[in-house]
């Protein structure tokens, strides 16, 4: 219990220690200086994510296939969802600025909400179909502006159990934006917290980045095959 409390306290204190940078980014955002805002935000977030893994959780991370990530355009990362540490893992160990679609409740958390908004996160209200559709449109517009997105088609954490079925609707963001999909396999993040409902340090995590899948210019029939294809690519390594 104490390990868990102090681990999350260290994460919160780290965020507080970057308050000057948060205020600076907010200043740039208000002034419409997007380039400087993004330089601050996408500089600090990967540092924070690596701090969480290497200093707080003392985890080791093995990354396979990082060279497969396109660097000349925005992409949509689609992967399995094992635990709370999935987002920090991707932010900290894939060398590409990215954002994600988050549930609306996170947009109300003090301090965290500022960083998420600066990060260009899209907040989705799952109980409202109309607002959910609008959120996907907004996220797709973000991809067109150059902000890579992260999507977990399972919709919920598997917590180390069998993966949940990938929901085809989650792929609309990639299809609407015309961005390539980069499948990613996350193996082991659930052991950090979900496995025992408390922080367990020193875990080994594996992140596999697969070959990009183009979506632009495909027919409806070709697009319809992609969700099952991506699910197989992502989840097959977990079964070995």
Image (cartoon, rainbow, N blue to C red):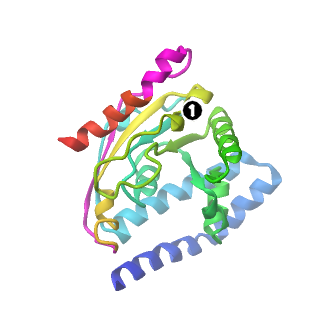
Please tell me which residue is depicted at 30% across the width and 39% down the height of the picture.
Answer: 235
The residue carrying pointer 1 sits among few (fewer than 14), some (14 to 19) or many (20 or more) residues within 10 Å by Cα, namely some
Question: Residue 16 in the image: x percent, y percent?
Answer: 58, 75
Q: From the viewer's perspective, is 203 left or right of 30?
A: left
Please tell me which residue is depicted at 37% across the width and 34% down the height of the picture.
Answer: 67
Question: Residue 126 in the image: x percent, y percent?
Answer: 61, 52
Residue nearest the viewer, comparing 144 with 232: 232
Q: From the viewer's perspective, is 14 left or right of 65?
A: right
Tell which residue pokes out farthest to the bottom in this image.
2
From the image, tell me which residue sits under label 1.
172
Q: Name the image quarter holding the N terminus.
A: bottom left
Q: Name the image quarter holding the C terminus.
A: top left
Element marked by disc 1: helix
Span shown in magenta: 198-226
In the rendered image, the vertical position of residue 197 relative to residue 105, given as above or below: below
Question: Residue 225 in the image: x percent, y percent?
Answer: 43, 22
**Corner quadrant of residue 114:** bottom right
Tell which residue pokes out farthest to the left in this image.
240
**Corner quadrant of residue 143:** top right
**Corner quadrant of residue 133:** top right
**Total number of numbered discs in the rendering:** 1
Question: Residue 91 in the image: x percent, y percent?
Answer: 47, 51
Q: From the viewer's perspective, is 9 left or right of 59?
A: right
Tell which residue pokes out farthest to the right in this image.
31
């Amino acid at each position: 219990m104490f390990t868990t409390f102090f681990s999350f306290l260290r994460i919160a204190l780290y965020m507080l220690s970057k308050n000057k940078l948060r205020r600076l980014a907010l200043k740039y955002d208000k002034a419409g200086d997007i380039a400087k805002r993004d330089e601050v935000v996408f500089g600090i977030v990967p540092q924070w994510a690596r701090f969480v893994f290497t200093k707080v959780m003392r985890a080791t991370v093995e990354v396979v296939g990082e060279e497969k990530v396109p660097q000349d355009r925005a992409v949509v990362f689609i992967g399995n969802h094992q635990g709370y540490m999935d987002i920090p893992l991707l932010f900290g160990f894939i060398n590409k600025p990215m954002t994600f679609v988050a549930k609306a409740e996170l947009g109300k958390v003090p301090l965290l909400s500022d960083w998420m908004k600066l990060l260009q996160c899209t907040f989705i209200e799952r109980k409202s179909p109309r607002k959910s559709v609008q959120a996907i449109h907004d996220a797709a517009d973000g991809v067109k502006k150059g902000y890579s997105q992260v999507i977990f088609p399972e919709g919920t954490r598997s917590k180390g159990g069998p993966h949940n079925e990938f929901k085809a609707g989650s792929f609309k963001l990639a299809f609407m934006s015309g961005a390539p999909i980069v499948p990613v396999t996350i193996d082991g993040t659930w052991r950090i917290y979900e496995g025992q409902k408390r922080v367990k340090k020193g875990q080994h995590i594996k992140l596999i980045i697969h070959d990009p899948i183009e979506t632009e210019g495909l027919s409806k029939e070709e697009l319809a095959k992609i969700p099952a294809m991506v699910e197989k690519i992502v989840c097959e390594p977990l079964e070995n």
